[in-house]
Image (tube, coloured by chain):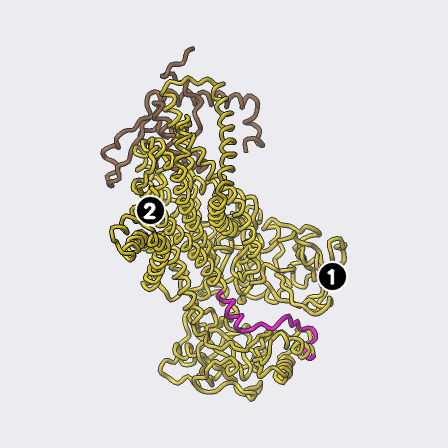
Chain colours: A yellow, B brown
Amino acid sequence: MRGLLVLYRWLLHAYPRAFRDTYGRDMTLVFRDRCRAVRAREGRTALVLSVAGACVDLLSGGLAERLHAARTAMRAQAIPSSPQSSRRRGDSMWQTIRQDLRYAITSATRQPAFALTVVLIFALGIGATSAIFSVVDAVLLKPLPYRDPGRLVSVLVTTPQKAYARIPVAPANLPDLQARTKGFATLAGFSPSWEMRLTGAGDPAEVYGQYVSAGLFDLLGVGPARGRAFLPEEDQPHGPRVVVVSASFWQQHFGPSAPLAGQTIQLDLQPYTIVGIMPAGFRLPLQASIVNERAGNAEFWLPFALNPYVASRRIPVMNVVGRLAAGVPLARAQSELDAVAAGLAHDVPTSRGQGLAAVPLQQEVVGHVETTLLVLFGAVAFLALIACANVANLLLARGINRSRELTMRFALGASRTRLVQQLLVESALDAAIGGLFGLLVAYGAVQALPGLDLPQLPHVTAIAVDGRVVAFTLGLAALTALLAGLAPALHATGDVALGSLKEGARTVTGPGRRLRNGLVLGEIAVALMLLVGGGLLLRSFWDLTHVNPGFRTARLVELPVSPTPSRFDTAERRRAYMTDLLGRLDGLPGIDAAAAVNRLPLSGTNTLVPVDVEGRPPAPDGQANSVDRRVTTPGYFRLMGIPLEAGRDFTPQDGVTAPLVAVVNEQMARQYWAGEQPIGRRVRLSLLSGAGPWLTVVGVIGNVRHHGLDTPVSPEIYVPYAQAPVESMTVVMQTRTDPEQLLGAVRARVWAVDPDQPVPALDTLAGVVSDSVATPRFRTLLVATFAGLALLLAALGIYGVVSYSVSRRTRDIGVRIALGAGRPAIVRMVVGEGLALALAGVAVGLCLALAATRVLASLLFDVTATDPLTYAAVAAVLVGVAGLASYLPARRAMRIDPIEALRAE
Amino acid sequence: MTPTPDDAAAHLPLTPVAFEILLALADGDRHGYDIMLEVERRTAGGLVLHPGTLYRAIHRLVEAGLAELVEPPPDRDSDDERRTYFRMTALGRRVAAAEARRLAGQVSAARARRLLKDPKVSS
């Protein structure tokens, strides 16, 4: 908050001094009070918007106030102004601007290198900012694409366990929610993306669809583009097999002009009748994450009544969305939900200990990326600020070189206002061209986005350079033109107005030098802040990718399989399927070993199951001891390099008739049998059908980071597939050759067992691990890039200031050399000047960084926001670069020939 | 009628922001943030002023002699943040009243033409 106030006070300089003196302090107080209120009431995004609005208001208001003051002063000189003369003045103002533009173009073509540099710096700053803005706008600022989205809320189940903080609702609980609440106009639900098999159209393919309850499309206010949505009677038990498909699915399989009536598709070997086609780009409001990475690509929607878990009060597979009734605030809906949760906990055993929470839908869908995006936007805004300082410095230098031209025009009768306007038009022209290039930069960046690996960014498809982004870019260009151009223009004309027509005024003291040094100092300080941010994220990412996941990835590939239900409908048939499949794959040339697991580490899927441990009292309701349950085939641990700490792995002898066994992980052993022998203990898992049979622990394996590299390990129980033949498994294979080359052979073997099993590709386990850190990688890469660019611009700034000072002091240096000063002394003097600036900038920057990097704290892993090593390293790098940037002009100074230097006067 | 500087009519029409500020000051002296909150409250959030806009408008009113700066009342703001308070001048009150009459005239004209009765327009 303090940083904001400093910024605001600085921006107040846009106003005339008298105004500032009278109202400045009060304005800052009002700004502060308002920021506090907005932050408390509406959150951080609103605060950022409000601050941005206040700054724009301040700058434009300041300019208007200066104009007003000037006009008042003119009127005070008793110049009568009639309406006609003011109209004429308007005309002539437009004329002078056109004249200035022509003049600006001429002077730009006279110094093309200078103009190009300025335009490029503008393009960089504006382009990067616009690109990030287009993401922030699409993801955070634009309302969700549904009718009256502000009244939509997501209803979630809450539990005391942190790792599972946001759970969907069990489908059979939806009717209770609908019946027991009055605050919602409607409540409806939909499933996460469901993988199904599309057959009857070429190779079997895996496609994703969602089950939706009948009122959902109505609730969202989005209907099919062609055909109809589901009828209430279609969302009933034993209802017809009907499907609504996406526009792209229809386009791909039927073509735009095909008739809708009577078209069918085959999903999981069952025919479905297509009744409607949704508009292009339609998607349901689901938080994007690794699990439902392909949720955005849901290609069809089915009535929820067809979902296998529709009658379950335990399996949470329904994302419930509600529309608040007119006039009902969120708080009232929440208190109703609290009452419903209490009622359910009483009536339904599986709901015990669970709460219900109403979260604004927008927040549920995008809340998890808010911090990342605001950090990125902040970083890029600071980069743009550095770019402005850099351009301002260049313009200052040029202003000094042009002082003779300006003096001449002043002498010929041009007023100072007129000259300032002329210079501002020049920087506005540069910024406008830079802004155009910046738009191209933003457009290119947005086009490149889908190619980047961004599984956790919602609305990726909605990101575009649209009218809003163009308007933002134009505004930004105007703002940067003013920020970069105003001070140099005032300064250049200030000298002129003072009448300094003195020839050979070679001093580098005075306000010009102070302004330039101040700008560079600011650049260094902000660059340091960005570098610290980038450094912290880099270190944290490095630590994250060097966490031991608990398994190896080398030469391992994975293939999800689910035996076609109609063909492998019994446990016996699935057991036979898995034995047959693994046997065939194991014998394949190029494959050393194959085993299967139902939930692959870091894939984002887990199964939380309540557990009873023999000899321990059962936990009270709601705080059930829960573990992650996994199913594996023998040899999986060895294949994955998961160490066996005690006991044994499963063997083929652990069959259906053998005693029931389990393997636990170290965390489970430590949590339930600390200091005791876990082997031989018995545990019991609660399954869908109720409490399961007792299992005997036969082995303990090492911990595996299943939930994420940065997430603590949970207790786990593994059971053998032969004793728990679940429907979906993932086969892991150790390969000796390129997975691409194996794909054909693997396909043939899989299809020999089950011809309808899709085999899209073999993904490497290294890829799975890498995907799990896509979001930190994305933000680290971007912030580090911005920090690198900031360093480059700051180095250019130092170089510019020092080499300018050297060129101004050629004579002075020549005299020193003539008087016997050694070359090293000259180098020390010049480099010392640059270093002094850099050190002052670093000192200011360290304070800024300490304040600013606090917002990063939640994004860091294993590193604190005040990590001394990062701060020290970044400061050292910056001082080193500053030294280098001043050494180049120092070498030039060293080579000055004293005789030449003196003669040149 | 020749307008004199003191004539309320010469200041009409007021800008919406200026009128809102005078309305806020009609109750008594207020400081800037207080004015902002009052305007926000009265317009139910419809008019949110940034500090720059607010103080420029206040400055215009002060220049025109419709409002003046006053010392904060002694019993308030003991929290070491002495703020400038603003007071509506007698001229300011006459101008605000004249503006209100002018607006009332427009409203009754609108009503006479059934613009206000028609729900499609008023909603």
- Of residues A607 and A177, the one nearer the viewer is A607
* Residue A147 badge: none
Q: What segment carries the magenta color?
A: A752-773
Q: Is residue B2 above or below residue A845?
A: above
On the same chain: label 2 and label 1? yes
A755 drawn magenta: yes
Q: Is residue A534 above or below residue B18?
A: below
Measuring from the top left, give residue A455's x and y in whole percent.
53, 62
Measuring from the top left, give residue A490's x and y in whole percent.
38, 36
Identify residue for label 1.
A264
The residue depicted at 36 percent of the width and 65 percent of the height is A863
Q: Could you tell me how many numbered marks the image carries? A: 2
Q: Secondary structure at mark 2?
A: helix
Q: Can residue A1 be seen?
A: no
- Of residues A100 and A651, the one nearer the viewer is A100
Which of marks 1 and 2 precedes in the sequence? 1
Q: Dot 2 falls on which chain?
A: A
User: Could you say which quadrant of the image residue A75 lies in?
Assistant: top left
* Residue A901 badge: 2
Q: Dot 1 falls on which chain?
A: A
Are there few (<14), some (14-19), or many (20+) residues within 10 Å of tag 1? some
